[in-house]
Image (cartoon, grey):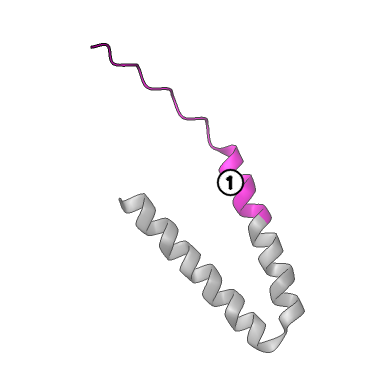
């Protein structure tokens, strides 16, 4: 729950910063948005894979 809230807060912060940059210079905001996307993908890929759950036998 806390991790989800922190991810949402981080997303809101990044979007607000990109919006502020876009008010001044749109191409710069597009470049920064692309870089932020690359960083997000790299962070997601650097996490270890989830451990598989044991199957329940009934």
Residue 39 within the magenta-colored segment of the rendering: yes
x, y percent for residue 23: 64, 87
Q: Is residue 42 left or right of residue 15?
A: right
- Quadrant of the rendered image containing residue 56: top left
Q: Is residue 32 left or right of residue 52?
A: right
According to the image, label 1 marks what residue?
A: 43
Q: Is residue 53 above or below residue 58?
A: below
Q: Which residues are drawn in magenta?
A: 38-58
Residue at point 54% right, 37% down?
Answer: 47
x, y percent for residue 19: 59, 80
Q: Is residue 21 above or below residue 57?
A: below
Task: Say few, some or many: other residues with alpha carbon within 10 Å of mark 1 (under 14 / 14 to 19 / 20 or more).
Answer: few
Q: Quadrant of the C terminus?
A: top left
Residue 56 within the magenta-colored segment of the rendering: yes
Q: Is residue 31 left or right of residue 48?
A: right
Secondary element under disc 1, as helix, strand or loop, is helix
Number of on-image labels: 1
| Depth check, front residue: 13 or 53 | 53
x, y percent for residue 54: 35, 17
**Residue most extreme to the left:** 58
């Amino acid at each position: 729950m806390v991790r989800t809230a922190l991810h949402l807060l981080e997303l809101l912060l990044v979007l607000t910063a990109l919006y502020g940059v876009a008010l001044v210079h749109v191409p710069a905001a597009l470049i920064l948005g692309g870089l932020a996307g690359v960083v997000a993908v790299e962070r997601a890929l650097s996490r270890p894979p989830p451990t598989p759950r044991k199957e329940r036998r009934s």
